[in-house]
C-alpha cells in the first residue's frame, strides 16, 4: 500500500460522514476496519506504517495548540486522538492542517463544535486501532499478533536482527540502590549516594 492507496481507503471510509468523528470516531473507524479487512494482512500492516508516519508528522506544537483550543484543553492521550481525527478528515484537510492548523477554523465540524460548545470535535480515539482490529478480523489472531507483526517490521526496517533484539529486557526496581549497583555499577558509583 502506498500513500495514495492509504488516502483512498481513508476517504472512502469517511465518504458520507461529512468529516464527523462523533463518539470517538466510531463510524469512520468501523468503515475503515471494513475496508481494511477486505485487503491482506500485509496491506493492513502497510496501512499502519503509513498511519504512524502521518500521525507522527502532526506531532507539532502548533497542531497541539489547535487541539487545545478545540478541545478546551488537550492531554497527551487526547492529542493522540486528535491527530487520528485529523487523518480521518482525509488528505486535503490533513495537508491543510500541516500547512496551517488554524485552517481548521474553516472545517464545518470545528465550526459546529464551537457553536455548540462541544469539546469533542475531531477527537477520534477509535481510528487509532482500525488496523489492529482489521488484522484480527482477517487473520483470526488477537491484537498481540498484530503488534508483534508490526514490531518485526520495525526491526527489519531498522536492520536489527534477532540476536540484538532482547526487547526491553528484565524489569527491575529503579529505586533499589543495591539492584542499580548490581546492574550498572559504574553509573551507580557516579550517581548514587555511597552511604546508602
Image: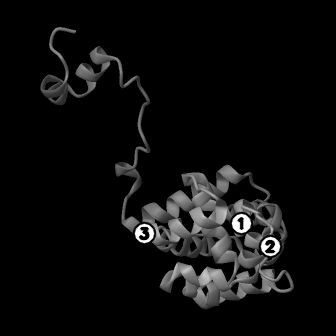
Residue 159: percent from left, percent from top:
36, 65
User: Is tag 1's residue or tag 2's residue first in the polypeptide sequence?
Assistant: 2
Label 2 to label 3: alpha-carbon separation: 30 Å
In this orientation, which residue lies closer to the viewer: 20 or 10? 20
Q: Residue furthest top?
A: 195
> According to the image, label 1 marks what residue?
127
User: Is tag 2's residue or tag 3's residue first in the polypeptide sequence?
Assistant: 2
Residue 90: percent from left, percent from top:
68, 84
Secondary structure of the residue carrying numbered label 1:
helix
User: Is tag 1's residue or tag 3's residue first in the polypeptide sequence?
Assistant: 1
Q: Residue at x 58, y 60 (%)?
A: 79
State left or right for residue 2 relative to residue 90.
left
Of tags 1 and 3, the one toward the viewer is 1
Q: Answer whether residue 60 is visible to the viewer in this image.
A: no
Report how many numbered discs are placed on residues in the image: 3
Question: Looking at the picture, does residue 172 appear above or below residue 83?
Answer: above
Whether residues under marks 1 and 2 lie with C-beta atoms below 8 angstroms apart, the answer is: yes
Of tags 2 and 3, the one toward the viewer is 2
Label 1 to label 2: alpha-carbon separation: 7 Å
Residue 175 picture quarter:
top left
Q: Answer whether residue 161 is visible to the viewer in this image.
A: yes
Secondary structure of the residue carrying numbered label 2:
helix
> According to the image, label 3 marks what residue?
157
User: Which mark is drawn over residue 28?
Assistant: 2
Amino acid at each position: 500500500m502506498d500513500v495514495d492507496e492509504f488516502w483512498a481507503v481513508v476517504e472512502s471510509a469517511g465518504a458520507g460522514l461529512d468529516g464527523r468523528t462523533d463518539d470517538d470516531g466510531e463510524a469512520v473507524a468501523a468503515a475503515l476496519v471494513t475496508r481494511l479487512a477486505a485487503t491482506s494482512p500485509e496491506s493492513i500492516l502497510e496501512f499502519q506504517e503509513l498511519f504512524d508516519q502521518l500521525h507522527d508528522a502532526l506531532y507539532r506544537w502548533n497542531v497541539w495548540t489547535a487541539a487545545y483550543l478545540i478541545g478546551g484543553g488537550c492531554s497527551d492521550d487526547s492529542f493522540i486522538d486528535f491527530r487520528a481525527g485529523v487523518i480521518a478528515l482525509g488528505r486535503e484537510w490533513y495537508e491543510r492542517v500541516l500547512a496551517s492548523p488554524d485552517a481548521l477554523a474553516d472545517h464545518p465540524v470545528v465550526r459546529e463544535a464551537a457553536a455548540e460548545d462541544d469539546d469533542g470535535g475531531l477527537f477520534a480515539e477509535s481510528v487509532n486501532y482500525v488496523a489492529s482490529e482489521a488484522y484480527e478480523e482477517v487473520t483470526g489472531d488477537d491484537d498481540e499478533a498484530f503488534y508483534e507483526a508490526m514490531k518485526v517490521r520495525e526491526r527489519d526496517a531498522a536492520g536489527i536482527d534477532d540476536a540484538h533484539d532482547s526487547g526491553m529486557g528484565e524489569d527491575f526496581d529503579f529505586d533499589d540502590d543495591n539492584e542499580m549497583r548490581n546492574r550498572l555499577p559504574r553509573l551507580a558509583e557516579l550517581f548514587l549516594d555511597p552511604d546508602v
